[in-house]
Amino acid sequence: MRSKVWAAVLIPVVVGAGVYLWADAADRVPGIVTSSPEPSPQPALITAEPFAAAQPSPGPVAGFDAGAPVPSPDAVQALALALRADKRTGTSTNVSVVDYLTGEVLADLGAQDGQVPASTTKLLTAVAALEQLGPAYTFHTSVTWRADTSRLTLVAGGDLMLTAGQGHGGSKLDSMGGPVANGWAGLRDLADQVAEAVPPSSLTGPIFIAVDTTNFPGPAYPAEWPAYALSMGYAGNVSGIAVNVGRPAKVTGGDYAKRDADQALRALKDFGAALERLGYEVSVVGHAASPAGIQDVAAVESAPLSAVVTHYLRYSDNAVAEQTWRVAALEAGRRAVPEEAAQVTLATLLQMGVDTTGLELYDGAGYSSRNRISPATLTSSLVESRTRDNTAALESYLPLAGLQGTVNARYRGTPVAGFMVGKTGSLTGVTSIAGIITTADGRQLAYATLLDGMPAGQPRPQAAIDDFLVALAGCGCGP
């Protein structure tokens, strides 16, 4: 009997929770990139809906049936071969399926071959960041004050999901009762703290405000990312600070809203507006480094990393994933630039024991067509994550098929709904997915499929992968 560990969470779902909120950005680009763009159902102010981030512990997830039979490797390999032979797939279809508990290889179809991974890259970004920083890590946004020049400096710390008003601090919950990451901390909170430290009544003239992004030298918009992603609102800058991931407050277009040209400056202006409401006379300076040795007069913390990771795994948020990748480099004592972030990720994965054969990373979100990840690296990262303190809860951060994120509408009503989590990926000619699935016998398997060489458009290769996963989930094929 298949475990109901994931299926049980479907019970409290409300009707509106099934809306397909944030597809892989590259899946949805019009023109040559995809043959079937869909209108965005989401309002401009996107709100993520991650699970509550319980403190993880090593070992299997709750309800994990260690005694369930392992499928026959011959049977699982046959399913992988059928996927490769499917006319809907491309010239390179590689598959890795391993037992989630033991790591036993059940299917190896070019599993060591590095391919363009698209957004499944975010899975490795999440694993490495969680392992290095811990699920309770928060992004720190602060304000410094220099009295002799009457200057406040807003110092970027990596939080792209600030709100212009007061943050909800975890009180805003999704339909499953988990905390929402977006808007956790607010610029109004910072302004209120400034008013306590430097009351408006103590000043005789204006205050000057600046924003410091020097810890994030850039490029603010990754050189590896396509221009259309910025112009069409699929991604934004990663300069260390933003309000609502850079989406303008008053704009139509939902997910497709073009991002602020200078997200840090927008955050600074929103901060200035909050100060003005408290009675300050404000003059905006713009970008400037905070003077050395100046103490903070205000600070806020983002949602915990577990909730941030849930957000960008569930909704394939490119900017938030890339920013997390660079913050991990900074916290490792390196520069927050792509080449050093890649080195830190690789070192962390190696330290965990992940198979990194052929791994090449040029960004942390998966837009780069130069990235190379093998299916074996993805399944290895899942298996190794299960047994470590900081990553043991990774399974609960991935979106649940038929219910959440990019595997919501795609798997709703299928036999895998409630029995699979997965991170999708797609670029022109590339379709991928990696995650964990429960078989009909109740055994959990880690899987990864990477396909490339297809013509533009995702429906056909996605349907082929979906048929493979449905067959894998339905496999009562014991040895």
Image (cartoon, helix red, strand yellow):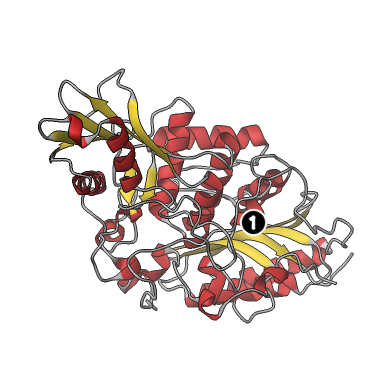
For residue 267, above or below residue 45: above
| Image location (x, y in percent) of residue 79 | 72, 70
For the point 29% across and 47% down, which residue is it?
A: 221
Asked where in the image residue 456 lies, by quadrant, the reply is bottom left
For disc 1, the marked residue is: 396
Mark 1 residue element = helix
Amino acid type, residue under disc 1 in the picture: Ser
User: Camera-side residue: 78 or 19?
Assistant: 19
For the point 67% across and 69% down, which residue is it?
A: 9
For the point 35% across and 44% down, which residue is it?
A: 189
Q: Is residue 65 left or right of residue 417?
A: right
For the point 82% across and 66% down, which residue is it?
A: 442
| Image location (x, y in percent) of residue 449 | 60, 61
For residue 328, above or below residue 295: below
User: Camera-side residue: 380 or 393?
Assistant: 393
User: Camera-side residue: 202 or 387?
Assistant: 202
Q: How many marks?
A: 1
User: Camera-side residue: 223 or 299?
Assistant: 299
> Looking at the figure, which quarter contains the N terminus?
bottom right
| Image location (x, y in percent) of residue 211 | 24, 36
Q: Is residue 76 left or right of residue 195?
A: right
Callout 1 crowding tier (Cα within 10 Å): few <14, some 14–19, many ≥20 = some
**Can you see residue 428?**
no
